[in-house]
Amino acid sequence: MKNSWNKRSLIGIKDLSASEINFLLDTAQKLKESGKSKIDSQFSLKGKRIVNLFLEPSTRTRIAFEVAAKSLDADIISIAEKSSSLTKGESLRDTACNIQALGADAIVLRHSSPGSAHFLSKMIDVPIINAGDGAHEHPSQALLDIFTLREKLGNLKGKKITILGDILFSRVARSNIWGMLKLGAEVTLSGPSTLVPQKMEELGVTVSYDLEKAIDEADAIMLLRIQHERQTQTHFPSLEEYSRMFGLRKNGCKPSAKTLILHPGPINRGVEIDTSLADSENSVIIDQVSNGVIVRMAILHLCCAENNQVIL
Ligand code: CP
């Protein structure tokens, strides 16, 4: 397959073409096939220094980037807001300039402000990888979600995928919508009308407030948690009511046995999904987490290697 990748930074899925997405996922597939113990030397990032600058909490993304960098023989340093001089009033730009001066070859940034990764990519001269910027985009999450779907369903063209929950405040939803549509999937959004604006149909998706209809015949359902940290007002009467109306429940509204269940995590069991369904055979939630390492290895390789012109 011809190399379609010519980006230094990964800011969002909106900026990627279908062939760039497929090339990155094919690179991840090649890394997965090469196995844990013997990564091909063409992927090595030996001598590179990656800095994980996480200014919002994270378990999966931060650790997956750490494991991915170490698997490629790169050095990685993780910085959290509380232990950095951001707490003393230093700006994001100054912090990043200092990290570059200290020898970083790339910065993986998680930040609460939409546009922060794009801003840094214009301010400093090292690749910036967006690990989530406010409610804007979370590209590495969408790439691992699509990688997992591709593994389980094959080509996404014509596949029916429902994204269910708090879409309004979700960077995961936004990145997945761009990616899934670019690869030809049919995307339905569902949840309370206060969290799933009808206007989102302008993106090329279907909006449905009828949960049964939204999940009927879906090949996959992606659940999202309620993102209380980004909400400034109440969008539904109570968590109990949300769960009754829009939660997947063993004794309520549930997908067919062949429908895949995805969730980017963290899961709020008993709210958006019952434990029995989260841990059921059609749940691929843990596969997503494992694939997150492989996909982030591909991202780091393509954005940071001197010669990233891998021909697959
Ligand atoms: N899915 C996700 O971004 O999880 P973390 O917040 O734990 O990184």
Image (cartoon, rainbow, N blue to C red):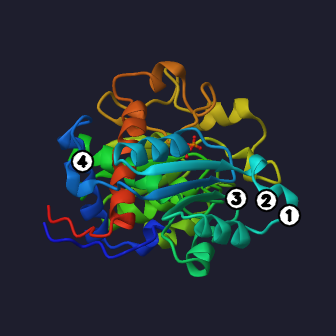
Query: Distance between the Cα atoms at labels 4 and 1?
Result: 41 Å
Where is residue 144 shown, x and y percent of the image? 38, 49
Query: Distance between the Cα atoms at labels 1 and 2?
Result: 5 Å
Which mark is first along the chain, 1 or 4?
4
**Above or below, 138 relative to 16:** above
Question: Which of the labelled discs sits on residue 74, or is there none?
Answer: none
Is residue 229 visible to us here? Answer: yes
Query: Distance between the Cα atoms at labels 3 and 2?
Result: 14 Å
Disc 4 and disc 3 in contact, CB within 8 angstroms: no
Question: Which of the labelled discs sits on residue 86, or is there none?
Answer: 2
The amino acid beneath tag 4 is Leu
> Mark 1 highlights which residue?
89
- Residue lying farthest to the right in this orientation: 88
> Mark 4 highlights which residue?
31
Foreground mark, 1 or 3, reads: 1
Question: For numbered disc 1, what is the local secondary structure?
Answer: loop
Foreground mark, 3 or 2, reads: 2
The amino acid beneath tag 3 is Ser
Disc 1 and disc 2 in contact, CB within 8 angstroms: yes
Question: For numbered disc 3, what is the local secondary structure?
Answer: loop
Question: For numbered disc 2, what is the local secondary structure?
Answer: helix
Is residue 213 visible to us here? Answer: no
Query: Distance between the Cα atoms at labels 4 and 3?
Result: 31 Å
Which mark is first along the chain, 3 or 1?
1
Q: Quadrant of the C terminus?
A: bottom left
Foreground mark, 4 or 1, reads: 1
